[in-house]
Image (cartoon, helix red, strand yellow):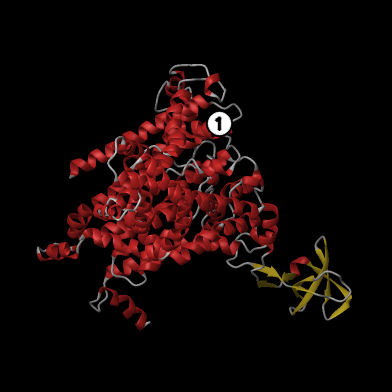
Amino acid sequence: MNASIRFRPLQAIGSGLGYIVNQFLNGVVSLLDLIFATLQSKLGYRKMPYIFVLPNLLIFGIFILFPMLLNFVYAFTGGIEFFPENRPWVGTANFEQLLTCGNFLNPNTCREDLFWRSVYNTISYVVAQVSLMVLFSLITALALNRNIKGRGFFRSVFFYPVLLSPIVVALIWKWILQENGLLNAILTWMNFNKAPFMVNADWARFWVVMISVWAFMGFYTLILLAGLQAIPAEVYEAGSIDGANDWQAFWRITLPLLMPNMLVVLVLSLIRAVQVFDLVFAFTGGGPGSATRYLVQFIYDNGFSSPTKRYGIAASASLLMASALIILTLLQLRLSKQED
Amino acid sequence: MGTVISYLTRTRGHGRLHITDFLTYGYLFLGTIIMFGPVLWLVLSSFKTPGEIVKFPPRLLPYRQVTVEVTGYEQPLPLFIVTQADGSTVELAQVRRVGLEAQMVDPADPGEIIRVHINDRQPVEHVSFALDNYIEGVQSFNFWVYLRNSVVVTVVATVLTLIVNSMAAFALSKYQFTGRDAIFLIMIGTLMVPLTVVLVPVFLVVNAVGWNNNLWGVIVPGAATPTGVFLLRQYMLTIPDELLDSARIDGASEWRIYTQLILPLAKPALAVLTIFSVMWRWNDFLWPLIVLSRSELFTLQVGLNSFQGALNIQWHLILAMTVLTLLPITVVFAFLQRNITTGIATTGMK
């Protein structure tokens, strides 16, 4: 029964956009009709799934899987050469370079101080961003789930920034937060002093978190809203018969039943937060100083932007980041299994 | 006022005022200002003149100074309100400014030059949404080239993604074959490790294929997205196998089954993947930034970013170009918003 509720909105799309997509696909596909018919008559029915999976597997293998394996080669070789055959084997030297620290809590004592700065920046960004993201999207989803007028309008308004590109988001907020921008004008109007939003390190960190919450919140709100709407009204009726007030109903009914969607939000927002790059790159460029320099920018700078390209360092930093991502995801999945 | 209150209180269905309704509406209205206000401010600002744009405190609407044609002068002259010694005001056009003194003429009687202290005059302005910034911006920004590149990348990549992913999803959901589970597991495994962490080797592969500085280098690597395969496979699993079997009995080839049976039935999931793909590709930044270094190949996002780096202070042009960049996706959203929001909410569940 749940499944049928779930797919009804999808069918609405199917009739509009899906129709156009399908028409287009039909055109392309009929050209291939003959080729595949001959293929099947030559190879037989049992070989056909391999043909179907082949194009995707080729692209996937060449541009995702093979590079992932190649990344290990880069991580264990040194020098400035780009082509792997010219790169000398250095063993774990790149990892030692990244991981050698006098005191891990103080980036200045590390051989690669920028790496540790970006690690700590990323950790504080992820913690702040993910918790604010979950909080605000939950509040918004709860508000949108009420029986209110203009629900579709409000839902679209909160979702709209999700569609904007990170570069556009960064420019919009840079314009508002600049020294003579709108926000400082409002502060002056309220008799406060202008605040150095883009120049002060703490302000810059604060705004990077707030802006990314602003930009991505609508997506997670929708996921939570879908979960809220899937909770049957009977559960609440049963709760109120048992004498539960609104507050108890929220903690005992809404939150537990929303857990699967919360988990999706948590995993997705965490993976995305760890990878933060383009928004900040266009917004602060990593500055002021290295206040908003995060891990992907460290990788980008070393691999592509700095005059002496340190591909080995970039690759080993990505390996460390990938393992952190995998551990985090598995940890979350394990925790959610225990709760069941 | 009474109707407003009854309108608001009606929402709970009891006909009575409830504090949570007010809180909800308060939160949603505040949210609307915060979510939509910045974009509105961007659009309003993009119409302001370079002089107006650096003014502090800024004004809400874009103003332009009124100019008048005065006989004897070739260019239209800017109009000012001048306060005279006796306190009365008169509208005069300014011919030129010399230090603290402005030389002005009465548009009705242009013969005589009137000398006025610059503090005694105020510009006459009107609200104007003139397109100067847009026209100048499009010329210096190469907008049409970037737009074409963005459209090509988005459309080709989305079509390629749909074809390749749906074929793979069909095989993975509707056939038993050796290696199927291994293929599926590897794909799901890479869901956790996104393209951004293997930048260097992907760039090497793209180089080896000869796609550096080529739109194909932007389009192809992301086309075999595991997310897309997973999304389509989960949907195709719900299509009953009996349908395929009866089609086979009727003599349909496997390709026929895929194109005439599976694709039409999977339309809803294909539509959602289309939306996702268009969003990903239109807004993609990091990967095009790495692959494309020749400016005639830039997509809008890469172009916009380099534009803001090159013209650090020219906000009036940057703002206008930012508006142009967000315009296409905003128009699409305005038409399809209900489909998009419900579609994403539904697939986000899985």
Say which residue appears at 56% left-offset and 38% top-offset: B290
At a point 26% along the width and 72% down the height, the residue shown is: B18
What is the residue that sits farthest to the bottom in this orientation?
A: B2
Q: Is residue A156 left or right of residue A266?
A: right
Q: Residue B55: x percent and y percent?
A: 64, 60
- The kind of residue on which mark 1 rests is Ala
Q: Residue at x 86, y 70 (%)?
A: B74
Residue A12 percent coordinates (x, y): 36, 65
Marked residue chain, label 1:
B
B39 shown above or below B9 = above
Which quadrant of the rendered structure holds the C terminus of chain A? top left
* Residue pointed to by mark 1: B208
Residue A151 appears left or right of B55? left
Q: Is residue B199 above or below residue A278?
A: above
- State whether residue A159 is above or below residue B6: above
Q: Secondary structure at mark 1?
A: helix
Q: How far from the left and from the top, in percent, is residue A280?
A: 50, 44
The mark tally for this picture is 1
Q: Is residue B52 left or right of residue A3?
A: right
Q: Would residue A183 be seen by someone viewing this image from the given angle? A: yes
> Outermost residue toward the left?
A242
Q: Is residue A125 visible?
A: no
Q: Which of these two is toward me, A317 or A182?
A: A317
The answer to which quarter of the image holds residue A107 is top left
Q: Residue at x 52, y 27 (%)?
A: A311
**In the rendered image, which quarter is residue A147 located in?**
bottom left
The quadrant of the image that shows the N terminus of chain A is bottom left
Q: Decide: few, some or many residues near mark 1? Use Cα within 10 Å; few <14, some 14-19, many ≥20.
A: few
